[in-house]
Amino acid sequence: MTTLNYDYFNQFKEQSLALKLLRSPHFALLTSFFYRAFIQSNQRSVPFQQLAALLDQHLFEIAELEGDALYPKSAKAYLDDWVNSRGGYLRKYLPQHSDEPECDLLPDVEKALRYLEDMQGRQFVGTESRLKLLLEMINNLVEGSSADQHSRLLALQQRKAELEQQIIAVELGQDAGFSDTQIRERLFLLADVSRQLLGDFRQVEVNFRSLDKQTRKTISLSGGHKGDVLDQVFSHQDVSNEVKQLRDFDALIKKIAEMGFITPLPNHPDEFEVQRILKAFISAEQIISFQQLLVSKYQFSDKEYQDE
């Protein structure tokens, strides 16, 4: 873990993309547009032409209030600046099976926008769901890490008894379900976790791209065997968990499908229909694109070893 000392913060001040955004003379334009195009609409990525049209509309609305002189350039020119400039705010790439480039926020930009969102405060703060989730995580950690089979058996029997009591209450008509406040709390928690998950996707992609770039560069400059080079790269990177995420992600998808939130499409096992309650938080395209990224990186690592 990085030590948060004076030297770290001194370098962070000069290198942080998030601070660059917050200090930008175009701060209001950048943050309002990025928030509108990606965060508020909960978009993982946006086609370049669509993003240009959104920015053009955004600039028009600002010009009606502030005049044309404030932001005189075209929407496409601004997007090119934000993509091509050193330390740009967007990543422009060509998706698989598509001829139109798309744009995505860089993770540090999203973190800055989340920070600004949190600074605004919330009129509704749900604590019951978060506290319950925290207690469940603590209990699961204690139970799952315990080597005492007797204690684990008692915990499972207690959980079974609680479920049986709930079943009896439902059968007797004594269980009214969640209150309106409890439902609202859980929806807020679902939205928060989903947004954090999207942020995690962006960060994992950046980590993989950075590792991929470093690995290819090391292989091209080294005269040694590819397997030895990969061993050298991986020995200096905490990538075991990232590669393992391929299997973990597949297990997560199966779990979500079992819960009924997503449904595999007939004759297309790698494509999903997302139920309406989740569509406001995460789309099937986001799940599939991230899964494809993990597969490609995992196959690249395997291929390098097999070539050796």
Image (cartoon, grey):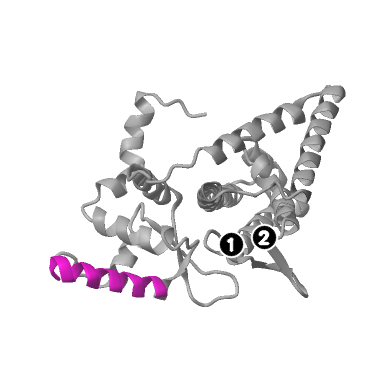
Frontmost residue, 60 versus 273: 273
Residue 78 vertical placement versus 113 (above, below) = below
Q: Quadrant of residue 258?
A: bottom right
Q: CA distance from mark 2 to mark 1?
A: 8 Å
**Residue 203 visible somewhere in the drawing:** no
Which element type, helix, strand or loop, lies under badge 2?
Answer: loop
> What x and y, as percent, mark residue 112?
37, 46
Q: Determine the main secondary structure of the stretch shown in magenta.
A: helix
Q: Are marks 2 and 1 in contact (CB under 8 Å)?
A: yes
What residue span does the magenta drawing correspond to?
A: 50-69
> What x and y, as percent, mark residue 28?
25, 55
Q: Which residue is mark 2?
A: 261
Frontmost residue, 120 versus 283: 120
Q: Quadrant of residue 85?
A: bottom left
Which element type, helix, strand or loop, lies under badge 1?
Answer: helix
Q: Is residue 64 magenta?
A: yes
**Residue 67 visible somewhere in the drawing:** yes
Q: Taking 251 as reference, is 53 left or right? A: left
> What x and y, as percent, mark residue 87?
36, 52
> What x and y, as percent, mark residue 12?
36, 36
Mark 1 is on which residue type?
Answer: Ile
Residue sitting farthest toward the bottom: 99
Mark 2 is on which residue type?
Answer: Phe
Q: Which residue is mark 1?
A: 277
Q: Is residue 138 magenta?
A: no
Name the residue rendered at 70%, 51% in the picture. 252
Dot 1 surroundings within 10 Å: few (below 14), some, or many (20 or more)?
Answer: few
